Image (cartoon, rainbow, N blue to C red):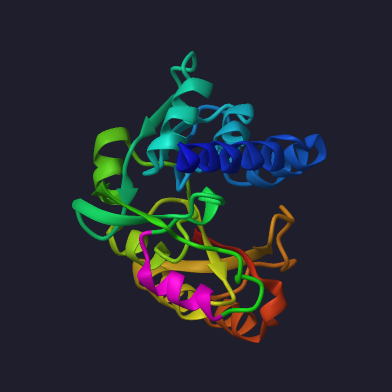
Amino acid sequence: MLTSLRTACGILRSLRIYYGNQKRAAAMDRHYGQFVGRGDLAFDIGAHVGDRIAAFRRLGARVVAAEPQPALVKVLRWMYRRDDAVVIESVAVGQSRGTTQLKINVANPTVSTASDAFIGAARSAPGWEAQTWTRTLRVPMTTLDALIARHGVPAFIKIDVEGFEAEVLAGLAQTVPALSFEFTTIQRDVAMACIERLRTLGYARFNAALGESQALVHGVWVDADAIAGWLAELPHTANSGDVYAVIG
C-alpha cells in the first residue's frame, strides 16, 4: 500500500510539472514543429507521463509511445483512450528483443531505468543523493527496428530512457529523418557512444537543447565532432539535455 501511494504521488508530481505550464507547452510545440508536422508519425521512446505525446498530437502527428512502467502505461492509456492516433506500447526499447530488468524509482518514476551503470553514476553524483531505486521488474523489450516494421518509418524519434540511450540506438539499423536522445553530465560516455552510433548510421548534422529549455543551443547545425566537443566541455551543473541529429 505504501509503495502504491508513493508511486501515485510521484506520478501526480510529474503530471503537475509536465502539464501545468502553458508557456512551456507552447515552447515545446514551436521546438518540435521543426521536426514533426501534420500527418507525420513520431515515436516517443520513454514516454513517462506523455507530455511529448501531447506536443506531437497538437502538431497533428500520429504517435507510437513506448513506456515500460506499468503504472505509467495505465495513466497513458487512460489519458489517450479516445485518441486513435496514439498507440501505447508497454515495452522497454533496447538492442534486442526479449526482456530486461527495469529498476523503479518509486518516488520519482521519471528516472526509472534499465541501466545499472546509470544508477551507479547517480549514486556518486552531486544533486542525485535523494534518488533511490527500490523495486525491480522484468519487462518486455523490443527494438526501434521492430517498432518501425510494425508501425512504419517515423519522421522523428525522441529517446529519453535514463542512461539506456546507447542500447536503444544499437537496435536501429536504418535512418529516420530526425531524432533526439537525452544526455546527462553524469554519463557523458553514453552520449558519446550515441553520437558515434549515429555517425555510423550516416547522421551528419547535430544540435542540442539544455534541460527543458525547448531551444537549440547552436545557431547552425554542427558535425559529430563539434557536438561531442561541446558536450565534453559542459559543466557538471548543466545536468542534462537532448542531442538532436538529422540526416543530410
Indicate yes or no whether the magenta region holds residue 49. no
**Residue 205 placement (x, y as % from top left):** 55, 67
**Residue 247 placement (x, y as % from top left):** 47, 59
**Residue 41 placement (x, y as % from top left):** 45, 35
Q: Residue at x 58, y 26 (%)?
A: 60
Which stretch appears magenta? 114-124
Indicate yes or no whether the magenta region holds residue 122. yes
Q: Residue at x 44, y 17 (%)?
A: 84
Q: Residue at x 49, y 77 (%)?
A: 121
Q: Is residue 239 above or below residue 181?
A: below
The residue nearer to you, when weighing 166 against 41, is: 166
Label total for image: 0
Q: Is residue 168 above or below residue 27?
A: below
Q: Is residue 247 above or below residue 49?
A: below
Q: Is residue 235 left or right of residue 168?
A: right
Which quadrant would the N terminus be assigned to in this image?
A: top left
Figure quadrant of residue 190 = bottom left
